Amino acid sequence: MNIPCSVPLRRLARWSLSLLITAGLLTPTAHPVAAQGGFNLPYGFVQESVVVGLDLPTSFALAPDGRIFIAEKAGRVRVVQDGELLPDPFIDMTTEVNDAADRGLMGIAVDPAWPNRPYVYVAFVYDPPEIKERNPSGARVSRVVRLTADPANLNVAAAGSGVVLVGTNSTAEHVGNPDQGDAEPFSCRDADGQPVRDCIAAEGTAHTIDMLKFGPEGALYVSVGDGIVNSKGNARALDINSLNGKILRIDPNTGEGLASNPFFDGDPGSNRSKVFALGMRNPFRFTVDPRNGRVIVGEVGNEKWEEINIGGPGANFGWPCYEGPEEAATYANCDAFRTGEWTVTHGVHSYRHTTKPQRGAAIGGDLYLGRSFPALYRGAYFYHDFNGGVTNFLTFGSDGSVTDNEFATNMPGIVQITATDDALYALSIILGGLWRIRYVPGGDRPPTAVATADPTGGIAPLEVAFSSDRSTDPESSIVSYRWDFGDGESSSKANPTHTYIENGVYPVTLTVTDAAGSTSSDTLEILVGSEPPVAEILEPGDGAKFRIGEEVAYRGQGVDPDNGELGEGRLVWSGILHHNEHIHYDAVKATGATGSFVFEDHGDNTYLELCLTVTDSQALQDQECVDVKAQEVTYTFDSVPRGLRITYAGSSYTTPFKVKTYINAKRIIEAPLTTADGLTFDRWSDGGDAVHDIVIEDGDRVLTAYYVDAAGAAAPETPDASALEDAPLMTPEEDAMAASTNGDAATPVQAEAERAAPSSDAPVATGVIRAEVWKDVAGSDLDAFVKTRQFKQDPPEIVELEQLAFPRGSGANYGVRIRGYLVPPQDGEYRFFISADDRAALSLSTDADPANKIVVAFTPDWTGPEVYDKYPEQATGPIALAAGERYYFEVLYKQADGKDNLFVAWERPGGGREVIDARYLAPFE
């Protein structure tokens, strides 16, 4: 099933593919080229490719000697040495790894004492040989294994060296239902229903075993999801005797729990002795703070919230009783939180699932503790949202406050972020590569070449239009282009056209050079003499609907214009599950023209994207995808009396409410046994107990929970019958919500992003701002401007401004600096915008100290007056500011010749875009 291309195109969802093409990250060719540029980074940061050409990479580990070990989802470990991806894997475990949907080889770590201790540690969902041929999406188990490198070749694992550290009882004997996921009997339970010793369950195809990380004391930490979607089973996240839904802390030599662990019971091999923290649904990525040993966890949420959690030994993050700052379920064991027996550690930052902007899958990252980045980022925690392709960072105030800040956008498919002293490393499962992000203070930052071509293949003579338009330079100073067309011809034009006469495969290289002499190259291939094939899905049709449990038959073909219909071995099917605004890979994997699969239940708000990729003898490809959906119905939930919290499929809502769900799906509903008014549960309208399973029937339905008073009298019916018809449909909210707490706070805090109008009582600034002007300074480059002899002297001219804009028509060859203090009129999130002709940059500090300033917006090239959307770098993301506080800012502006303009605008909380008035500013002191 390997397709000879440097990005696994067959794995990309259509939205991903179109996004990458639009963004310039992926050339839409039959020989796609991995991205060399495209991350939207703050001014001064550069993106460098470490390795591309990986097949669904999931995790990586940086070895002390410079090697990089990278886990691929299917079960291979790849090695990068001296900047090169080695052709042979460190190990191939594909026969042991179950990689259905979100399962696979998910975590990897290298021993801190490498190579003296030549150990590599891997975490994966295990496919026991006795059940390997059963339904791959059925229940399985997980393991952590230590591998030893071959002393004769450290790039290869020694044969037979694997030692199971965790999961020695993760065997076929302890798999619950290998033919059906999320169904009882559950895995890793004994005959009495108690957790099996040293066994990690994986009923679901998501939130299984996740990540490995060494702590500063040398312990190996392991994050494990609850391993299940069925809300009957996810309560094991709170069971200290289960390994699921936990952060484990073990001895890397033995796999045993450490005596310093919070629940150590004297038996280092017991499950509870290994537990460090609990109450998690999917702690997909985490880090260990080397300063205090606390874990910082990115918790992928369920219906509403994503969380960043921080906790020490014994921290309980509350799942499934809490999601974000809210109560999510009313299971019996949740009473321990209400009585005070347990204390929930709420997230230091939580945010809601939204569709505009797209947010909904937190990928935990790492602390930056180096000194190479500007002061604002030192001590910050970087994390990613998979849905939005956005990387943010949290800063921590001395008063315990936590501030969320946007760092970079247009970063698709990031599944791990790791910080070193001088860089961030980001791994993309979508792009199939690893990138390094560095800060280059002052000086010249290198350009990034991006070559595209249209068409990329065809019959000779073939005319091809080449473009360098997606190439960038931080200083916007690309001065030369060189194209090598691979046939002995070349061009120095930015966007040349070239005709190929002879058949063949031609490697084309674009090299760009900036004003400082720095260069960057990008390569693509042109195939002359062959047309790409055409993929066609004959069934099912796009948008076809099925009931849960039905068999879906698929049929397709691939036609090569040169050689006719392609053989079955050249047709590859893949399925991408879209669930709650995020995606899961490998829901379907098959080869051939026909086949079938069972339409399984993955919860509400899901659909399957089925794709067919065809490859011809020249390795040219085409792909077609269709959406396969479930037949849905509307269920309405009510109670007598109304206004009670009813739990549906693990999430609680106030009655009456509606849900869209799927025919034949199984859901759990739960009504509280008592109410605050002293009423007692009597019955459900379907005759079920307070907590019971329902199978969704064909047709809309109303289910009502009835209550009685102490005398057994029924609570009175609510007369407003229209309330049922008007009941809200429970879908992920789109409102801008955030929540934060101080560290290990034990009380939920929810704060809506402020939208208040400016208060007349808000502190005001002095209303004075001054621009420093230097005349007779040629050029438009800002870095060059601040290095000039003139700039290092006092400004010969001062201009007082009424707003943050410089007068137009002021001439040519001059430079300007405007600096002072911004005094926001209200609490909330602000966005900033800048326009200029020729160049300008806005810097903002986290406080009144100029040393903490960073560039937040700039113009890569000239723009029209108050034109703020020509380049993405002109606008910031939301920046949280406090009313009345003073924030140092600085604007640098350089005009060369021609027309001139400089405008700096903002959007205040709840307000429109406007140029910043001087009444919110104060001069630099």
Image (cartoon, helix red, strand yellow):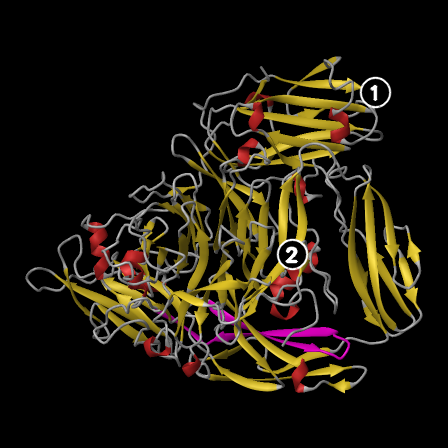
**Main secondary structure along the magenta-highlighted residues:** strand
Q: Is residue 582 above or below residue 476?
A: below
Q: Toward which corner of the image does residue 154 lie, by quadrant?
A: bottom right
State yes or no: discs 1 and 2 in contact (Cβ < 8 Å).
no
> Could one spot residue 722 in this view of the protein?
no
Q: Is residue 680 above or below residue 557?
A: above
| Mark 2: secondary structure | strand
Q: Position of residue 142 (x, y in %)?
A: 41, 68
Image quadrant containing the N terminus: bottom right
Q: Secondary structure at mark 1?
A: loop
Q: Which residue is more in the foreground, 829 or 438?
A: 438
Would residue 618 be counted in the magenta stretch? yes
Residue displayed at 60% across by 69% down: 11
Residue picked out by circle 2: 81
Q: Earlier in the sequence, mark 1 or mark 2?
A: 2
Query: Residue flagged by tag 1: what amino acid is it?
Result: Asp
